Amino acid sequence: MKRVLVLSSSPRRDGNSWTMAQAAAGGAREAGHDVDVAHLADYVEGLFRDCRTCRGADGACTIGDRYEELLHERVLPADGLVVATPLYWYGMSGALKTFFDRLFCYTSGSAPDGETVATGLTGKRAALLIACEESYRGATAGLVTQFQELTRYLHQELVGVAVGIGNSRGEVQRDPGRPLEQAAELGRRLFDIRVTDYRIDTVRSNRVWGRTPESGNGTAPLASATAPGG
Ligand SMILES: Cc1cc2nc3c(=O)[nH]c(=O)nc-3n(C[C@H](O)[C@H](O)[C@H](O)COP(=O)(O)O)c2cc1C
């Protein structure tokens, strides 16, 4: 059993990203995981500041909200993170951006236990859920790229992105693209989805999916890897 944190970052608590977050949580529960769901708004109030003037004498962040609790009690213990956000100005919500900005306060060299926190953020599986009004693919492209890069930076594995189109509360349920099913599937398969990122010299088979009984449901890589093109 893995621990999954589903973090919803819209100020609209019963909105579309929350609806997608709930679907992902349901999928992860179906897969038998220990699922924790949180509203970012309960934890993050203050913006990132100038750390030089903001840190206490012990180096700790002095912004007086529940960010530290979220980080230490819910984010760091999770094996998988599912992050839900509305699309705001073609990017993530301000609260979610602040969540990432403020990781700096806890991971930099001057933060108490900065190295331990930084290490604790790595190795997680991640998925992104986006609720937005526009279905134009370019609308979400910047956010998807940013999330790809920040998970790469954190040594996390981005397993997938689901985009739900809707504007009024809960309207994503009516999106014919079935984003709630996609979100549920991401939650269900968070730790099974095969993520590959080859280089020219990556040793690999000429097939992607296993065919033998040993390879189970076909999502496992073939057991015997050969040279490129082999
Ligand atoms: C400040 C703000 C900025 C927005 N910017 C965009 C945008 O750039 N593109 C878009 O498709 N929708 C945009 N929207 C619409 C929301 O993404 C959309 O209503 C979404 O479903 C809201 O999700 P929520 O219910 O989880 O808050 C914006 C909404 C707000 C309030």
Image (cartoon, rainbow, N blue to C red):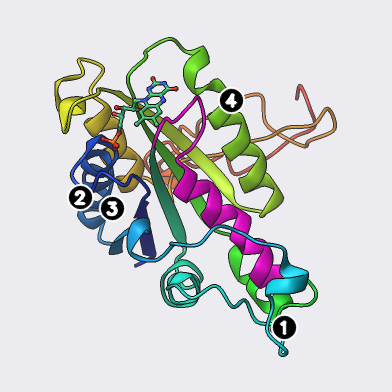
Q: Nearer the viewer, mark 1 or mark 3?
A: 1
Q: Which comes sooner in the sequence, label 1 or label 3?
A: 3
Question: Is 173 on the left or on the right of 228, as rendered?
Answer: left
Marks 2,3: beta carbons within 8 A: yes
Q: Which comes sooner in the sequence, label 4 or label 3?
A: 3
| Residue 109 lies in the magenta-colored region | no
Residue holding disc 1: 59
Residue holding disc 2: 26
Q: Looking at the rendering, in which quadrant would you find the C terminus?
A: top right
Question: Percent from the top left, x then y, of residue 77?
Answer: 46, 73
Magenta-colored span:
86-107
Question: Is 136 on the left or on the right of 119, as rendered?
Answer: left
Asked if residue 19 is positioned above or below residue 76 in the image, the reply reads above
Q: Which comes sooner in the sequence, label 4 or label 1?
A: 1
Q: How many marks?
A: 4
Question: Percent from the top left, x then y, of residue 216?
Answer: 39, 44
Question: Quick one: label 4, few (<14), some, or many (20+) residues within 10 Å?
Answer: some
Cα distance, mark 4 to mark 2? Answer: 28 Å
Cα distance, mark 1 to mark 2? Answer: 39 Å
Cα distance, mark 4 to mark 3? Answer: 27 Å
Magenta segment main secondary structure = helix
Between 107 and 3, the one lying in front of the other is 107
